[in-house]
Image (spheres, helix red, strand yellow):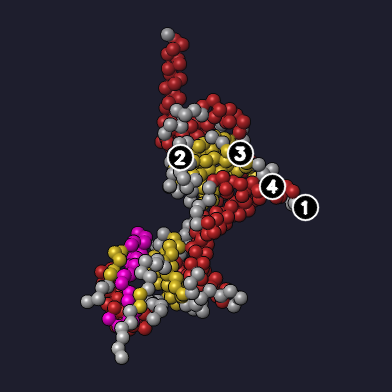
Amino acid sequence: MEYLIGIQMKHDYDKMFKLSEKILLLCVGEAGDTVQFAEYIQKNVQLYKMRNGYELSPAAAANFTRKNLADYLRSRTPYHVNLLLAGYDEADGPGLYYMDYLSALAKAPFAAHGYGAFLTLSILDRYYRPDLTREEAVDLLKKCLEELNKRFILNLPSFTVRLIDKDGIHDMEKLPIGPK
Amino acid sequence: HDSCSFILKVGIRGKDIVVLGVEKKSVAKLQEERTVRKICALDEHVCMAFAGLTADARIVINRARVECQSHRLTVEDPVTVEYITRYIATLKQRYTQSNGRRPFGISALIVGFDYDGTPRLYQTDPSGTYHAWKANAIGRSAKTVREFLEKNYTDEAIASDNDAIKLAIKALLEVVQSGGKNIELAVIRRNQPLKSKEIETLVAEIEKEKEEEAEKKKQKKSS
């Protein structure tokens, strides 16, 4: 007996939260926890800006987020969320931070969460170089999405892509990876 | 010994702009000037200037800043100027009626734009009352400046953004020793964050206008 499985997820759900002009937080996990936690961090980062007159650096924001997550972890109400924090610092340049629901924080050249990570991390391992240009980086991202389209059980019709550089956050065209 | 009650502050509500002008008190030679902040942003669209005890103001400003973000978090909207003024006033009132606490020794001028675009100016005092104003002054010689504003605040006087700014400077110059060096100005325009204003050129313009007025009067008298 043969049958086809087609599983469709919501494809217009934006999981990225703008913490500041040059920092984005991608938050996935338990429904509700994601938005609650991410918005709480977002408002606290803004409060820091109001109090001090300048914005938190990406490294500081990542560590602040980690501390918050860790504090809640051993409370009665832990947040089950996995995060990717991306930002551009004037002094240190671009930075990517990987954080999981156990509040483990790691600065990484590339990262992924979820089942898709099983497929994409090996692509990134193979083709990532520290000196990638912007176009090469976008191409690498496209390679990952092609792999997902080939081997991943879920149908992911479109991806929201954002880019952070010294001029801030830029929306790139939605990458539709249709079936070939 | 706190010197903030002796600083003159002027707030003006224009059509598309709100202006806060503050007298810059000369600091001691060895003191770093930029650590004396008198105009404080509470959120991107609201700011306040205070007269009174700086230490008390720090506490109130901090509570207001947290409340601005808390409001955004729960209601997903920025505060209206009236809301945050009411919050600050309620906070001040609580300290006039509780045991063992003394009132906050500050008066505040709170300016900003609501998200529907209306400009607002409010004043609070230590008792916890607040009122909306079209233009107001607090601090040193506030009475004199308020009288000047009562005479000169007309719809034509604030017709454009620049006119509103000039009116604020003129009001300050009534009392402050002349010169742009002694005035600090902050403006908020609709949908734009707080900006410190360059006033050297405007002050020069005002001085020139004054001279021209004086010249005209002299010529009239002589003829």
Tell me which numbered mark, 2 or 3, is placed earlier along the sequence. 2
Tell me which numbered mark, 4 or 1, is placed earlier along the sequence. 4
* Nearer-the-camera pick, A70 or B21: A70
Q: Which chain is indicated by disc 4? A: B
Tell me which numbered mark, 1 or 2, is placed earlier along the sequence. 2
Residue positioned 48% across, 57% down in the render? A54
Q: Residue furthest left?
A: A180
Please tell me the numbered disc located at residue B99: 1
Find disc 2 in the rendering and name its residue. Answer: B17
Is residue A144 part of the magenta span, yes or no? no
Instruction: Measuring from the top left, give residue B119's x and y in whole percent.
Output: 49, 41
Instruction: Measuring from the top left, give residue B148's x and y in whole percent.
Output: 55, 27
Q: Which chain is indicated by disc 1? A: B
Q: Is residue B12 above or below residue A61?
A: above
Find disc 3 in the rendering and name its residue. Answer: B131
Tell me which numbered mark, 2 or 4, is placed earlier along the sequence. 2
Q: Which chain is indicated by disc 3? A: B
Q: Crowdedness of circle 4 by 10 Å Cα count: few (<14), some, many (20+)?
A: some
Quadrant of the drawing holding the C terminus of chain B: top left
Q: Main secondary structure of the magenta part?
A: strand
| Residue type highlighted by circle 1 | Asn
Region in magenta = A150-171
Q: Mark 2 to mark 4: distance in Å?
A: 30 Å
Is residue A169 part of the magenta span, yes or no? yes
Q: Residue furthest right?
A: B99
Find disc 4 in the rendering and name its residue. Answer: B93
Do marks 2 and 3 share a chain?
Answer: yes
